[in-house]
Amino acid sequence: MSTSALRPWDRGAASDRAAETGLWLFMAVVATLFMLFLSAYAMRMDTADWTSIVMPGQLWLSTALLLAGGAAMQRAAVAARTLHHARARRLLLVGGAAAVAFLAAQLWAWQNLLDQRVGLSGNPAASFFYLLTALHGLHVIGGLLAWGAVVQAAMSPATEPRRLALQITLCARYWHLLFVVWLVLFAALGWLTPEVVRFICGRG
Amino acid sequence: MALVDTATHDDAPKSFFTRYVWSQDHKVIAVQYAGTAIAVGLVGLLLSNLMRLQIGFPGVFEFINAERYYQFVTMHGMIMVIYLLTALFLGGFGNYLIPLMIGARDMVFPYMNMLSFWVYLLSVLVLMTSFFVPGGATGAGWTLYPPQAILPGTPGHEWGIILMLVSLLIFIVATTMGGLNYVTTVLQARCEGMTLLRMPLSVWGIFVATVLALLAFPALFVSGVMMLLDKTLGTSFFMPALLSMGQASDYKGGSPLLFQHLFWFFGHPEVYIVALPAFGIVSDLISVHARKAIFGYRTMVWAIVIIGGLSFVVWAHHMFVSGMNPWFGFFFATSTLIIAVPTAIKVYNWVLTLWRGDIHLSVPMLFTLAFILTFLSGGLTGLFLGNVSVDIPLSGTYFVVAHFHMVMGVAPLLVVFGAITHWFPCITGRMLDERLGRFHFWVTFIGTYLIYFPMHYLGVLGMPRRYHEYANYDFIPASAHSLNAFITVVALFVGAAQLVFVYNLVRSALHGRPAGSNPWRAASLEWATPQVPPQHGNWGATLPVAYRWAYAYSVPGARQDFIAQNAPLQDGGVEPQAPSKPAPGREAAR
Amino acid sequence: MAIAIALLLIVLGSVAFHVVTPWWSTPLASNWGAMDDTMTVTVIVTGIFFVVINLFVVYTLWRFRHRRDARAAYEPENKRLERWLIGVTTVGIVALLAPGLVVYARFVDPPQEAMQLEVLGQQWQWRFRLPGADGAMGGSDVRFVSGDNPFGLDPSDPKAQDDVLIGANEVHLPLGQPVKVLLRSHDALHDFFVPNFRARMNIVPGQVSWFWFTPTRTGRFEAMCAQLCGVGHPAMRGFVVVDDAAAYQAWLQQQPTFAMTLAKVPAGAPGSAQDLLARGRDLAQSKGCVACHTVDGRSGVGPTWKGLYGKTETFADGSTALVDEAYLRGFIRDPKARNVKGFPPVMPQIELAGDELDALVAYIIAQSDRRPQR
């Protein structure tokens, strides 16, 4: 009869590893999703009716906000790991607020386009713009929901410090993913042209 | 001196609702998934029988007009592929087997696991409502090709297609939640001694299939969202300038082929999402019921991984006559025929496992043997369709219908029946009724072969698929219509026989013969729990330790013809590649 | 042992079935015999694997069935055997793929001297176009489609003027002349499939796809749509007639050009009432009405024309109307205005010139014994 033990702190460590792995996997799924959208974007671009749209200036602001949010999250994670709880809580809130501000800036960019009567249908470049920014925004909202739970844990004195540090680290990782995805989307929407696509596909 | 894991006693659910409804126990969730999948599968079965009534006896059943026929075709296909097979293999078998076979207490994210079932159930309900909305369900074919799927002329183009797409998007959320669970659990929650290369092949098959699902379903998500926007908000992702029922439309510039590329980038891995778990389970069923280690375990693992990887580069063999760039045909024909090699290896290894085995012709073994025949048949016809120039006259005919039913419908379903029969005693502590099982087996096996084997020849003749009637074609002889009538009659019998299986499930769960803890004398861990059926937490106070692989059958010199995976090390039977092993059985014989 | 016997019978039965089956490829009428040959090679190779592996299983089941005190062998692997099997399988795969790709390389490379034929698909009818004397097809676009210009040809393109238009669902081709079939659709995906020719391709709206073949036998061959395109998909039928050179020329002379259709020159002389009905019947075929309306009383996608004239029709909203001549004309001109109860509202607006409408209505009226009761 075999016996095996799982020491109490082993279970915590195992659970942490599981959470990290789970998030890496989810990040791979999200990255795959956006890569597929971008391939669709590139393929659709290669048609006669393609006219690019000019990127609204608000996107520079939103990019900066998302960058700031990621930086704040990263510093929050470091603070939590080194047991500086007050600082960690502050930076956690800043990171989330920056993400909310990012969403607001994105909506402002949408309003800018709508004011120029660039709508969802009628121009495929515009269709993709709204679609890609909307999906990215939905993933930011999803991240904010998780962030809300972490904030709740951070405010509660019963939360184990190591567990909280992990949760904030995971938030930071996800924020970094969303930032990288946003950079790639922004670059594609702004600077990927049919000529570049044709060059890549070998039909210059 | 080891400490004891006390997790089990404190957090077990207490009320009826938390034990059986809002359960976070993987075993309960598995049964919930399986029950829902089987129920919706019976709906799909009914739809197929209605379709066959029309094909076999055209015009006799007047309520099956063209519109309804195409709605039946579409819903049948989507239900069977996605809502039955994918949900059953991943959500049903994956949930039940993975933690037990790797020595874990449960999945690593039990709450998300529970959510994934309820989201799956929601997706099923949304799909079913499409029957009842104005215009009815979509009749675009399970492939949902634009532009016609969202244009007048196709049934359900108003609401049915929207509900279908929304249902799929919801299903993808459920699958992702489940998939994160299965992969992370396999990677992180294996018990001590359970290396990846000691896991049973059932786990390998489901694990790789889940990785495929996580990476392939996003493509369906992308195409679904874009088609939804084309339909509801007038975008032109997939819609070129066209006439709709003779009138000019506002769409322009979109590409129907873009949808097809995205759909099949998902669609081909999807068939392996169904097939790989079946492959893994077959390996385990053969080993147990022939009392012999699976032949070439490591090769089998590599084959599963390679097939999974290659499945992402063959998709356009579904598009050889789509009008895509003709030069793609060379690449995809080659990649498709390459994927045949690891698949063939698996077939050889199953057969070589039987060779010099001690073959018990139990009901699970019968289903496994039937799988080998039908999968071989269906896989070989895939070589016709994968070879681009042979595919050209066969595409869009009944040859394709016969091929994919044989390889996706018949073969995996035979595995499902065998697997449920095999693990029923583990889940319920009782055996399924043997006589009902054999009756169901023979009718299903012989019946489905009689249905689909001749059907290939109708395809070679040139009979096109997705027609609700074939009147007055000179090239279709009367004998072909008679064959269709024959196929219909057999299909009705086979359909009715499935009710015998369902009856057997229910009756045996309540009144079946008590099974004891390991009626098949299997070596893998799911039979080694302190109680059978396993209780909450699976392993009692202490987790198991694995000292060998799961295939220590008929080890020379061993007392019994199997050595359990968690039996003490000195019982021998370690896997061939174990680092410094004693010769198998020498320790025990001493 | 029943299973071993069953497997044996299935293998023998399958082989026997293959030998005696009456259902095999239609007689070849094109140059693509190589596709048939490659399929034959595939049947042989896959057949060998099917028979050998299954017979091996049958033998194994019999020889190693469970007996008391029998024990399985323990041989978890055999690397040499596996390598050998991989080798044999690879040889088999290459034996299939090589001829397949060689044939395909010819399929994607039409001969220089191929003539062009355009097949135009539209829910749910076929039309055809030939380049005419100048050897070039004129440009086309959906925005040019109108009652007078159902092909959607660009009226300002000089190359389009002499394009020969075939508005019916039957087209002729000359024997022995390679033809590159250009495929175009106005609305949905379609596929122009003539089993006897083997070669075919999907039609995608928004682009022009193609395939090529050389007809090698005279005859009248059935064409059908092979890509689901809506409820009228099974009714979208056509014919390809392969003629010798003289007969082909004779047929070609009779077909109007685009310029002639624009000038409304009738292709044949107008005639008696009998000719009117015959014309109406031809229109019902060429405009695709028969995709949905029968004349023998069977219900199709749309109401049958038998007994239609003179009856009182009920609509989805409960109202009724008498089917007289004005009703028929009005419905054809504007099918969206009303929805007949029990039928899907999918009737397309088909372009008809005035005299065509007369002929078609006359034909519909002739399918009924009734006279409208007032």
Image: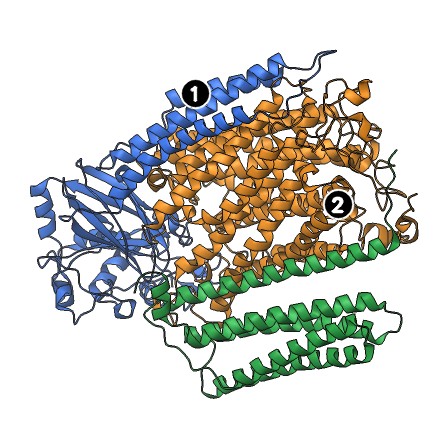
**Chain identifier, blue in the render:** C
Q: Which circle, 1 or 2, is nearer the viewer? A: 2
Which image quarter holds the N terminus of chain A? top right
Q: Quadrant of residue C325?
A: bottom left
Left or right: C105 with respect to B245?
A: left
The three-letter amino acid code for the residue at tag 1 is: Val
Give the structural element (helix, strand or loop) at label 2.
loop
Q: Which mark is residue B141?
A: none
- Chain B rendered in what hue? orange
Q: Residue at x 77, y 77 (%)?
A: A88
- Chain A rendered in what hue? green
Q: CA distance from mark 1 to mark 2?
A: 48 Å
Give the structural element (helix, strand or loop) at label 1.
helix
The three-letter amino acid code for the residue at tag 2 is: Arg
Comparing B508 with B173, the one in front is B173
Residue under label 2, please give it: B190
Q: Position of residue C262 (x, y in %)?
A: 15, 67
Q: Position of residue A176 (x, y in %)?
A: 62, 71
- Above or below — where is A135 with respect to C96? below
Left or right: B249 with respect to C160?
A: right
Disc 1 residue crowd, few under 14, some 14–19, many 20+, Cα 10 Å: some
Q: Residue at x 61, y 45 (%)?
A: B208
